[in-house]
Image (cartoon, grey):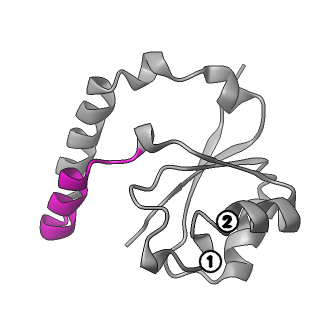
Amino acid sequence: MIMKIYTIGFAKKNAEKFFNLLNLNNIERLIDIRLNPRGQLAGFTKQDDLPYFLSNLICCEYHYLRILAPSDELLSNYRNDKNWDKYALEFEKLMDERKIPYSLDRTFFEEKNCCLLCCQW
């Protein structure tokens, strides 16, 4: 089975655009991988509100998987130097350290159309 996973960020999007993009792509399961999903800057995507909006606007599930979030240090380093290649390498190393390829249940991502929610700057 081919696994197709989408990604979306909430930055520079209003709620209408955000939910329309998810709906247009038939997203059934949103997986929040943000380090701080309750952050002040999360706006309409705050963890306490997002499951309600997803369920009632587009019939979509919400799940938070902190294990897929970058570390505080990794995120800080990227914000300081804006070196995407370095960030990507360090993130991949972090995922290997967390044994992500072996610790996640593939069926969770195969059962429904999934989208990872991250931050975008």
The residue wearing badge 2 is 50
Neighbour tally class for label 1: few under 14, some 14-19, many 20 plus, Cα within 10 Å: some
Instruction: State the residue at coordinates (81%, 52%).
Output: 26
At label 1, the amino acid type is: Phe
Relative to residue 44, is residue 8 depicted above or below?
above
Instruction: State the residue at coordinates (68%, 28%).
Output: 108
Where disc 2 sits, the SS reads helix
Instruction: State the residue at coordinates (41%, 61%).
Output: 36
Mark before the other along the chain sequence, 2 or 1:
1
Which region shows up in magenta?
A: 69-82
Where disc 1 sits, the SS reads helix
Instruction: State the residue at coordinates (24%, 54%).
Output: 72
User: What distance separates the C-alpha of mark 2 from that of mark 1?
Assistant: 7 Å
Q: Quadrant of residue 39?
A: bottom left
Residue in the foreground of this view, choosing between 16 and 86? 16
The residue wearing badge 1 is 44
Left or right of 75, for residue 111: right
Residue 107: give x, y in percent of width and height: 69, 22
- Quadrant (top left, top right, bottom left, bottom right) of the C terminus: bottom left
Residue 101: give x, y in percent of width and height: 44, 21
Does the stretch in magenta take in 80? Answer: yes
Relative to residue 57, is residue 4 depicted above or below?
above
Residue in the foreground of this view, choosing between 6 and 71? 71
Residue 8: give x, y in percent of width and height: 57, 60
Relative to residue 94, is residue 29 depicted above or below?
below
CB atoms of marks 2 and 1 within 8 Å: yes
